[in-house]
Image: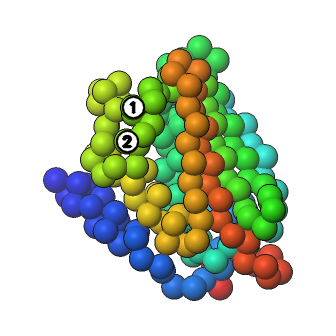
Amino acid sequence: MSELVDALLRFCRAGTLSERALGELDTAVATILLEQSQAAAAAGVALERTLEPGLAVLCPVTLLQSISQNLLSNAVKYTAGRPEAKVTVRVVREKGHALLEVADNGPGMSEQSRAALFTPFFRAPDARRLPGYGLGLATTKRLVEAHGGSIEVKSVLGAGTQVTVRLPLAGLAPVTAAA
């Protein structure tokens, strides 16, 4: 019950702009990749990464890590057990934005599930066998949008899912931690 309450609190707080601190998206993602690498290895999921350095965005590093954690843990969780399971993570600069892209070759999802994906407490029928509350992606979307970004999901049933987060670049020299 306390985990559900914590998840609800994170969801409620996610819709507001946090302090105006700089964080490097690549550094936040690298930290989460380090944490997720053990879970991925234990689940037989290969992790591939491309991280362009120095992509500063106006979002605290802790929130960037929260966004990354949700996307990466979902990709590993839903890809585990598949033949040649693989999750690919890219952090790159694109037209004034820092892009975080997490793609997997997991089971994918139906159009109906994809349409409801960011609804609080939504759990796709195939996902109900796995742990979760249905708040992770709803919270992630609120965090991204509160910091001027966008999130997009492409998925093909039986072939995998790709989630792309776009956050505006801060336009300043790279920083090494939240300012």
Which element carries disc 2, helix, strand or loop? helix
Assess disc 1: are there few (<14), some (14-19) or many (≥20) residues with their C-alpha within 10 Å of its C-alpha: few
Specify the label residue 162 is tagged with. Answer: none
Residue at the spot of label 2: 116
Q: Report helix, strand or loop for mark 1.
A: helix
Would residue 111 be found to the left or right of residue 40 on screen? Answer: left
Whole-percent x, y for residue 3 in the image: 25, 55
Q: Quadrant of the C terminus?
A: bottom right
Q: Is residue 115 among the parts visible in the rendering?
A: yes
Type of residue at label 2?
A: Ala
**Closer to the camera, 162 or 34?**
162
Q: Give the spatial CA distance, label 2 vs label 1.
A: 7 Å
Q: Which residue is mark 1?
A: 112
Residue 34, can we see it? no
Question: Would you place residue 168 above or below residue 135 in this image?
Answer: below
The three-letter amino acid code for the residue at tag 1 is: Gln
Crowd tier of the residue under label 2, counting other residues whose Cα lies within 10 Å: few below 14, some 14–19, many 20 or above: some
Residue placed most toward the observer, 110 or 36? 110
User: In this view, which residue lies farthest toward the left?
Assistant: 1
Residue 54: x and y in percent read 80, 68
Q: Is residue 89 above or below residue 32?
A: above
